Amino acid sequence: MTDRPFIPTIAPSLTRLGLQLTVSLALAGLIAAPSELGAQGRGRGAGPAPPQTPKAAAPIDLTGYWVAVVTEDWRYRMVTPMKGDYQGVPMTDAARAVADAWDPDKEEASGDRCKSYGAPAILRVPGRLHITWQDDQTLKMDTDVGQQTRVFHFGDWKSPGGPATLQGDSVAEWQQAGGRGATDGSLTVTTTNLKGGFLRKNGIPYSDRTTMTEYYELVTQPDGSPLLVVTISTTDPVYLRQPFVITSQFKKEPTDAKWKPAPCSAKW
Amino acid sequence: MSLSSRLIAIVTVIVSCASAPAFAEIDLSGSWQAINHEDALERGAGPNPADWAGLPFNESGRAKALNFNQSVISEPERICWFQTQWHIAAGPFSLRMWAVPDPVTGKIQAWVVGSWETRAPMTIWMDGRPRPSKNAPHDQTGFTTGVWNGNELIATTTHLKTGYMRRNGAASSDQATITTHFRRHGNLMTVTLFMDDPVYLTEPYILTRSYNLSTNPVNIAGPPCIVGDEGVESGRVPHHLPGQNPYIGEMTKRYGIPLEALMGGAETMYPEYRDKIKDKFVMPAKCTINCGR
């Protein structure tokens, strides 16, 4: 007798609670679902979806026109640094010997005026970048000053070999930010097969054994517009005692109105 | 709220939290060794006097810088005067960072960028606390709040006193806002700083710095600062009167850079400015001082 009145009182509550819990769990599942669906492709029954192309998977948009903002190393970038000024570069003695022999007139006359426009130095040149997708797997970067082109290959691209070049062979990979709702990320670019050149216009050398890793990220400026920040780590067992790490920044421009192609110069 | 409703709410929250990934953030704690490959002279020994190239000065900023005399830091009143948080970029020092958890919830309440002998700790409040009134006291430390954007920590600092943007007299005002972005790339960290100052700048001044994660602990505070006699008597304010700064032209002599470029201004930050000074620049034959040897 003591149980009977109790059962009808609690049973509907439990039933209602169970129903509500079911709905609640379903809602919670829906909240969590997008990330899992994203990870699995397109859900059960449809089979695994083809992986997104690097272009489609880009967590940040690097395309467009970008202008260098020169607030650092100004006297090494905006004017030609004088012979023997090596502040900040962790050079070996061998590098110093090469740089001490730098002769801008000879460089200019040699016909090889692009030594300071190779991949380890090109983002220090005051100028503009134009970044575009060459295809779904390949990002391309052109410069107006020096008229250089860098190509970033995604996926399992392998270098075809061949002679070393000023811009080398670059392999790129997106770094996605983790976490719910994150739309952020960065790009890591590794470059090898580089022809030797100058880290600065005044003859500080890097050798053809140089490799470099770059990190491309977008930072939001106080006015809300994007700033492209590139951290460049250059390693050279011949001419550097430790990786040479510098960071260059670029503001986005709406059009190509200020794009001004100019050839390499060994003296300016 | 009934018992069942409360239970449902709790279950919903627990299941949601357990299923979804954590909020985007990354561990920044540790000792970060400064890599001073760019602006090595400026960050180390200090910038050349009267070199403001690449600084987006307005006329007030330029006038204040021209008035600057380095001996001000020997005034007894200023010997123990901290730099503002901009010293992270203007100085050569390494960083040590750690998170401060809330003792009850365990959530990160703040990130701290440890101090140096000339800079107070930077506490980045992550708990959503409101910014003080604009009339609240300002100091060199300022007030800093932070948010995560993916794996990037963004810190915003206000309530600063006047400080230096460059250690040769380029000043920031008490109206300045510093925004600092910390982003880790493996064991490398890139820090991007914006100085937005409506009093002395025409547009934000941007600097980027790099750090290597290190197992050598970075000292988080220098020795105590003791006021001593550095040759400037109390009450005297070293300065240069307008038109009487003796260092004007020193950089032109040493580096061949035209004087107009050294006076700064936003246009000196952009590539086309090179066209303006190309015919005025005279490259000296050889470096003789501060050459990095």
Image (cartoon, coloured by chain):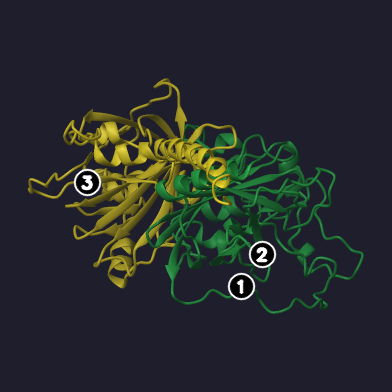
Chain colours: A yellow, B green
- Most extreme residue toward the front is A1
- The answer to whether the residue labelled 2 contacts the one labelled 1, judged by CB atoms less than 8 Å apart, is yes
For disc 1, the chain is B
Which residue is rendered at x = 59% and y = 62% of the image?
Answer: B91
**Element under disc 3:** strand
Alpha-carbon distance for marks 2 and 1? 8 Å
Taking the view exactly as shown, the residue that stands out farthest to the right is: B235
Disc 2 residue type (three-letter): Pro
Q: Which sits in the foreground, A62 or B259?
A: A62
Q: Label 3 vs label 2: CA separation?
A: 40 Å
Any part of residue B236 in sight: yes
The residue carrying mark 3 is A170
Q: Nearer the viewer, residue A251 or B166?
A: A251
State the CA–CA distance, disc 1 to disc 3: 39 Å
User: Which kind of residue does numbered mark 3 sit on?
Assistant: Ser
Q: Which residue is mark 2?
A: B121
